[in-house]
Structures are given as C-alpha cells and as structure tokens.
Image (cartoon, coloured by chain):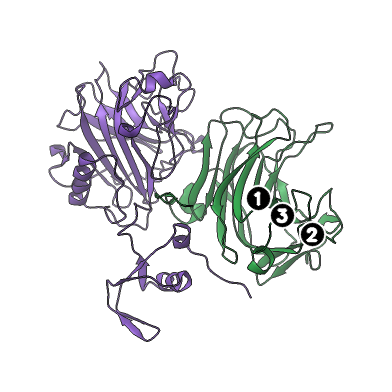
Amino acid sequence: MLAEGFSQSEFNGTNMIKFLANKTVAGIRYGKGTVVSFDPVIEGQLIAAGDAETDPIDKSHPYYFFHGYAGNQFAGDSMFFDFAAGNHGVRGANLSDAEMFATAGIVTTKAPSNPYDTCIRLPNLNYDYSIGEKLFVWWLGKIMPEANERVFIGDGFGVSTTGNGQRGLQIRVNQAGKLTIAVYGAAAKAGLLSNSVPFDGSMHDIALVLDGAKRRYGYWVDGKMDSAFAGVMLPFYPSENFDTKNSNTFNLGSSAPAPGAAAAPQSGIATQTRALVIIRLPASYSSPSASTVTSVCKTLRANPGKLLLGNAL
Amino acid sequence: MSLVASYPFTDFSLIQGVAGNGKNVAGASYPQGIPNVLTIQEGMLRAYVTDSHAKTDSGHRAEIYLTPDTLGENWYSWEFMLPPAYWADYTGGALTCGQMHESPDSGDAPRQPNFMLQIMSGMLYVVWPRATLPAESTSYDRFPVTNLEWGRWYSVCLRVNWQITTAGFREVLIDRVPVYRQWGVPTAYDDVVQPYFKLGIYNTSGGLSGDKVAYFRNLTRWTGNDGYQAVLGGAPLTRPALSQI
C-alpha cells in the first residue's frame, strides 16, 4: 500500500509540535502548549486535524524571503547572500564586484544614470497584497537623498495589466530624507511621509509593514514606530484592492527590472546597505501587531546578522 | 493567469499522449493507458518501467505528455511518490521523473531538454541546459536539491517564463520551498514550437534500471501569474537555515 507521508515539516529536518488544545495520544494526555516530538506521520495527522502546530521555537521564520547581512561579506563574493532562504541578490549588469564591496561591511549600489542596471536584484517576490499577504521589510544602511524623490527598494513601476508585469511596491527616499512608499495595483497610491529623517547619509534602520489582510501599513525608523502613525498602523486606501503581483526581480537600489533604463523615480538611487530583511506572510497568517514589529526592529538592529525565529512575527 | 488544466487522473482522455513499452499513442485513443506501464490507480498515475520493456523513442520510459507551451509564463504543479520497494536499493544512473522536453525544428541537432527532474543516488536533481539558450547543445548542469525519502509524497512546482532573451526566468519549488530560482536568463530554444511537459519515468542514463514504479497526482497547469497562493496554496516557505548533510 502507499505510504502517505506528505509533510512540510519533514523537509525542514527534525521537528517538534506544540499542542493547541488538550489531547490524548496513544493513551497519554498532553496539555495545551506541550511541545513534543512524534513520528512525522503522527505529527502530520495532528497538525492536519488542527490539534497541533509545528513548533517554531527553535526554527528560523518559515516565511523568510531574504535576510542579507553585509557585515559577513567580502569583495569577491559577487552576490548579496541571503542566508535565510537562498534568494541571493545578484549584481545588475553595470555594478561591478569592486563597486558593490567598495566599503567594508556594506554593500553598495550606484546611482543609475546611463549606464543603468546598477542595483542588486533579488529573485521575484510576487507579493500579493490583494489576497491578504503581509510584507515586512527591514533595512539598515546609509542613503544621501537626491534633489527629487527616488525609489531605493522595490519591484513595481506602473499600473499596466500586461501580464502583471509592472505592478508591485516601491519604498522611497523623499528629497527631504523622509521615508515613503508607493503601491501599484490597478491604481497607484502613495503612503504618508515619515516625520523622521532616516536618509541623511548616516546609518539608520527603517521598516515597513504592508498588511493586505487588514489593508493597513506602518513605518518604523531606528527601532520606533514613526510618529506619523501615532502608535498604530493606519489604513492604506482600504477601498483599493491593490493587485501587486508581478514577475519582476525584487531590487535594492531601484524598482525597475533589467535593463533598468527607467525614468526617475523608479530608476533608483545610490544605496549603502548593512542588512536587509524581507518576510512575506501568507494570507492565512495572523497580522503582526505594531508592538511586535517594534520589538523585531530592535532585535534586528542589535544583531542584524542573526536570523529571526519563527515566533518573532 | 488562468488554470489551463487540472488532471484528476480518472483516465487519460485529456492527455495529449502516453508513451511506454514501445508505444507512443494519443491519450484520447488509450484512455485507460498502457496496461501495467501507465495506469491509473485510485486517482493517481502509476508509471512502471523495467529493463525488459521495449524502448520507446530511443529509451525506456513510461510517460504522459501534454500539448506544447507557448513563450511566456507557465506553471506546472504536481505531486510524486517513489515506493521504497522499488527505489531503496537503487544505485544506477539518473532516472528522470518529470521534464519539459524541447520541440526541435526540422533539422535541429540533439539538444538537452529545457528542464528535467532527476533521481540519482537517493537525491532529487534539477537539470538545466548548460549552454546559454537559445544556443543548442546536449550539455547540462545537474543541481542536487534535496535528499529523497522513499514512500513520501513530494509536491513540485515549476514556474518558468519561456524566452529566448534575458526576459526569461525559471524557478522550482519542492514542498513550497524554492530550491532553484534564476531571473534574467533565456530559457527557451529558438523553435517554432515551444517545449512540452512530460510526467512519468524515463531512463535518462540508458543503463539498467530494474523495476521502477512512481506515482503522480494532482497535476495542474497554469499560464500567466495568479501568484503563489493560487498555485501552491500559500506563500513559499523558507528552506532550512541550518546546514544539513
């Protein structure tokens, strides 16, 4: 007979499960919250029945898209390594290895002016706001603002419907050094400007949460929620259903796909990045609270080279 | 994006063709498959290859195949399981358990298929042409992606944008975990007809395989981009963050 053993947990190696309710298994009673290890088939059945969940305590976050830390990298690495999910960032055609690692402990992208394609390109994120996915982006680095607003992280550059090819997300550096975003679905909408000024040429961290389930968003700067949000995540045009799916690379230093000869602001800006963290939570995953995100930002700033655990967000 | 087809494997009538034991015939003509080679068992496709079978198109195989893709974004999702009785002791050459086979124009030289999923030495491999496409060559690169457990169901998702320019991309997910992702790369040969999907067992190495059985189920085929949630049922998962041997 066929053995039915389909289980994600097995792929990730040895696992434990946590009971979500009091449960008796093989005559032994286990209290809610008990963390135990069974045969993978038994674990799979308990998870499928809703009696238990894979215990995330000793695991890195299961929905990482990227966690890169330039402090562990050197000239010659060629790529911005992702040590969470393997989604390494590759250099644009006109960004050399020497330019990328010109400053120790930092990965650098150049301002795009012909030649373009001077950013770092991660694989496609395909973040889906409309269906309720949540996106957490945390970045630590230095950017000097330009005379006009520029995109420094993103994958969207328009509202065209052709093959979902243009839509997506932009994280922007305002000319006054403030943080803002733009989201491209059938409509293009911009977020608030931060009150803080994280882009002044010195080291700062910023974070963004875009919550497609609750249709809200928030910014964090240097471990605190930006005061423009007054302590709570705010609605992001809740009447708009932003379809942000696309087939583009997710970029650091630009939001335009290769060859990147796009007009400003999506063409990009020179960036110096110490660390970048991107987590995409599925629609079924509960939305993180503002206080949880604040805690995560502080944790990451203290040690940006350390993976977040599964229970962090 | 649209769901092009969902194959519940009740019969082969919607399958373009079935091939094995010397036969290569239309699924509509052989809705019950090829007895003891390509059959349906409890909603699953059962593929069986053995060395005494007649060769089909130059090799031992038991495969279904679908209509060709067109240039652009295509997704295939399916599940497979390799019963331990047939696989646990296997030490032979690579066996293919799913592929996107190129459709050569008349006069084209032999070429490496656009994509293959192979089993060898207890591991699952993703195999791509080594040449920068659309250059034609039979060379290939074989990337190990996971150790296999016999008797366990694995889900596979292949997402590829068939292009002969750097607008192409390709990624493979096993159990929702991306194991290979490459953007900005040509993925297609410059052919009139684009590659077509094949699922089953094909003895790539040409050596002795012994008796080999594989099961497949829940095959779906999509074009465009409806996102991971639609095809995978959720966002991709991260791969293990600790080194494993």
The span from disc 1 to disc 3 (Cα, nearest Å) is 12 Å
Q: Nearer the viewer, mark 1 or mark 2?
A: 1
Inspect the image, locate mark 3, and give the three-letter code of the amino acid beneath it: Gly
Of residues A167 and A22, the one nearer the viewer is A22
Bin the neighbour count of mark 2 within 10 Å (Cα to Cα): few under 14, some 14-19, many 20 and up.
Answer: some
Q: Chain of mark 3?
A: B
- Pointer 3: residues within 10 angstroms few (<14), some, or many (20+)? some
Which residue corresponds to the image point at 43% horizontal and 33% vertical from the top-left?
A89
Q: Nearer the viewer, mark 1 or mark 3?
A: 3
Coordinates of residue A158 in the picture (x, y in percent) = 42, 30
Q: Of helix, strand and loop, which one carries label 1?
A: strand
> Which chain wears purple?
A
Q: Is residue B60 above or below residue A266?
A: below
Residue A264 numbered mark, or none: none
Q: On the image, numbered disc 2 is attached to which residue?
A: B28
SS for callout 2: loop
Q: Residue at x 70, y 32 (%)?
A: B189
Write down which chain is painted green: B
Give residue A98's quadrant in the image.
top left
Q: Chain of mark 2?
A: B
Badge number at residue B118: 1
